[in-house]
Image (cartoon, helix red, strand yellow):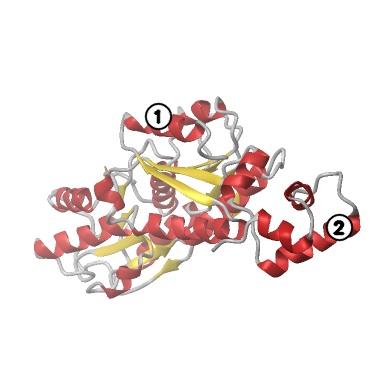
Amino acid sequence: MAVTISDVAAAAGVSKGTVSLALNGHKGVGEDTRRRILSVAESLGWSPSLMARGLASSRTFAIGLVLERDPKLLGTDPFFAGFIAGIESVLATHEFTLVLAVAHGDAAEAAYRKLAAGRVDGFILTDLRMDDSRIDLLSGFGLPAVTLNRPAIDSPFPAVSLEGSESVKDAVRHLVALGHRRIAHVGGPQGYVHGRARRLAWAEAMVEAGLEPELFVEADFTAEQGASATSALLQRNWPPTAIVYANDIMATAGQSKAQTLGYSVPKDLSVVGYDNAEFAQYLNPPLTTIEADPISWGREAAGLLLSLVGGAQSAPDIVLPAPRLIVRGSSGPAPAVD
């Protein structure tokens, strides 16, 4: 059974009120008595319940995360599993819990309001949009928040960002060095900060190489649209010889679709993904991809938010190191006839 304040009081020979004052650091207890009570509590293995701590401090000891993605995508995208694991690794050491909600579409705002009504001490905001209305929504709650990436509009919240643009350029440069000239990009929704950033990086690298960034298809990060976008690109009169995808899910589906259409990868078509999901190395051929680190994203975001919950008035943005390009068998020299 859990050790209670009554147990500590009986063992220390004092009242429950004295124990409460001592354990909460309040005045009215002599220093010798306080030390004796703390020693007894430690020897008995006593620890405060989160509910009791919350009542004493007006905190919930919980942070909120609302994932605004189609549940079909969440079931296949490995990013969020790693990201949540990173968050939990930090929260566990501070005795905080993660309150997770999956709310797609119109239900998302209601989810934020419900969590903000005394259920969490702050939020981690993912999938930042260029003009994100959630910034104003969360600002009105009076709770701290941390965003993944920084929106185009003014935001009072610190951000954890990834210098991923240079890595996308590295992928394009890698393909250009292999002789490719028609390099396409299957990107994520352009309303998302990271979807737009990856498209712009691809386009800039193409221009730097003296190439036209004209082969672009916007998709939604799902395997279904990754395959559909690939099919559309390969049915053009002048199809690409290489495709850079905004995530590994779309790249995997695109590679499979190309092979179904009779393309040999990488002989006829080179494929590059983004994320370095664990399965990427086991494809046939193994997927060339950009290595993101969702666990680090989660750790940094959780640590930054806990500092604000703990009383920090402000915190600087955190910029994670640029991920590296991992070259595997899905990228190779451009076809001889180009």
Pair 2/1: label in front: 2
- The answer to whether residue 101 is visible is yes
The quarter of the displayed image where residue 290 is located: bottom left
Which of the pair 182/198 is nearer the observer?
198
Name the spot of residue 303 as percent of width and height, x first.
61, 53
Name the spot of residue 298 as percent of width and height, x first.
51, 55
What secondary structure is found at the residue carrying circle 2? helix
Q: Quadrant of the N terminus?
A: bottom right
First in residue order: circle 2 vs circle 1: 2
Q: Residue at x 16, y 53 (%)?
A: 234
Judge left or right: residue 39 versus residue 6: right
- The answer to whether residue 321 is visible is no
Which of the pair 152/141 is nearer the observer?
141
Q: Residue at x 43, y 35 (%)?
A: 129
The quarter of the displayed image where residue 82 is located: bottom left
Few, some or many residues within 10 Å of mark 1 (<14, 14–19, 20+): some
What secondary structure is found at the residue carrying circle 1? helix
Above or below 172: residue 198: above
Judge left or right: residue 105 versus residue 143: left
What is the spatial separation of the Cα atoms under label 2 and label 1, in whole angstroms? 50 Å
Report which residue position mark 1 lands on.
Answer: 109
Which of the pair 247/146 is nearer the observer?
146
The amino acid type found where label 2 is placed reads Thr
Judge left or right: residue 129 versus residue 269: right
Report which residue position mark 2 lands on.
Answer: 33
Q: Residue at x 19, y 66 (%)?
A: 268
The amino acid type found where label 1 is placed reads Glu
Which of the pair 199/73 is nearer the observer?
73
Name the spot of residue 65 as percent of width and height, x first.
45, 44
Judge left or right: residue 311 versus residue 212: right
